[in-house]
Image (tube, grey):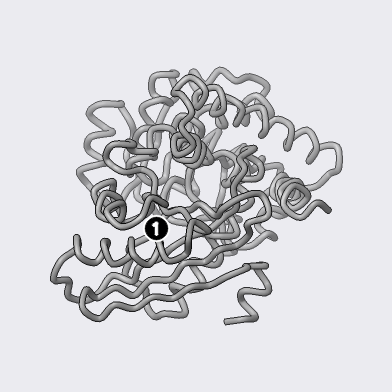
Amino acid sequence: MFATMEAARVEELHLASDPQTGLRAIIAIHNTNLGPALGGCRYLAYADEQSAARDAVRLARGMSYKAALAGLALGGGKAVIISPPQLASREALFEAFGRFVDKLGGRYITAVDSGTSSADMDCIARHTRHVTSTTQGGDPSPHTALGVFAGIRATAEARLGSADLKGLRIAVQGLGHVGYALAEHLSAAGAELLVSDIDEGRLQRAVERLGAQPVSSEVLLGMPCDILAPCGLGGAINPQTVGQLRCAAVAGAANNQLDSPEMGDQLAARGILYAPDYVINSGGLIFVALQHQGLSPAEITAHLSRIGARLSEIYAEAQAERRSPARVADMLAERLIYGS
């Protein structure tokens, strides 16, 4: 486990167990050079504790990079809660997690993530102030989608010569809160949508309301399109799928879209422009962070609008240096975090 932490340059790894509620949680704090670590709390069924810890470490690193390139005075952290086989009270479990977060004294601020909701954050907030995206605070998903939409326009301009999305064929993989909201923005902009999701109800809604074409998840990655937007779980671009892609660019909301940094190199070699995920999907983090700091909606919206400009800078530097945008984004983030 120490080798995993050192490889990702993670500062701290905290484990909590509460047999009474069934809580088994891990909090990874990647870096606090720029400020306290902020990152969501996942509630998922992991195969084992090692898998959960690896997920927390990997995601915490991404949050540090995301905060740095978003211009936030924050570090990166992530929490994972291993969902128990039997749960007596979800409310009690998240209250126990709130007590765990509070013991860290503000070094970690938690938020909504996969498998958790604003109602869960309300339970956490009964025991700590180091929590965002409560019911009162609001759902960050629409802001993530808005930032991704801005990033797709910047990506289209860089790769296809225009930020106008009308008539472009865009494949959206995953229609959760962020994916569906993004699909709505794309549809309104006149894009032709291909969509996939394991939930038939979500697919049907996109077909009926947005005029989208449904495609199975297995087929979608290989469909000819202008832009592929992965919006589900991570690892969509991996050794098995990277050769199947028939798109001009990859720009979506999912975290950790690349199975490894080498996948970014392969995309660049094939002429496929990649929008670094932690840059394009930073809208939710920007919203919860700035709201937690008490900034106004107008100030938050102004900050969100910079996502496209940041991507354009990364694309220009990647082209000048003949490196993948993923490598350039990592370099820029590390320079901000570590000062080198």
Residue extending farthest to the right is 321
Determine whether, in the image, residue 136 is placed left or right of residue 226. left
Q: Quadrant of residue 98?
A: bottom left
Residue extending farthest to the left is 88
Residue drawn where x is 84% and y is 44% of the image? 322
Determine whether, in the image, residue 210 is placed left or right of residue 285. left
Quadrant of the image containing the N terminus: bottom right
Residue drawn where x is 61% and y is 53% of the image? 64
Question: Viewer-proximal residue, 3 or 311?
Answer: 3
Can you identify the residue that label 1 sits on? 41
Question: Viewer-proximal residue, 170 or 322?
Answer: 322
Dot 1 alpha-carbon crowd within 10 angstroms: few under 14, some 14 to 19, many 20 or more = many
Answer above or below: position of 77 versus 187: below
In the rendered picture of this protein, how many numbered marks are placed on residues? 1
Residue drawn where x is 70% and y is 30% of the image? 312
Answer above or below: position of 111 versus 179: below
Res. 224 in view:
no
Rendering coords of residue 88 (x, y %): 13, 71
Rendering coords of residue 161 (x, y %): 68, 22
Residue drawn where x is 61% and y is 50% of the image? 35
Res. 176 in view:
yes
Determine whether, in the image, residue 166 is placed left or right of residue 179. right
Amino acid type indicated by mark 1: Cys
Rendering coords of residue 131 (x, y %): 39, 50
Rendering coords of residue 179 (x, y %): 38, 40
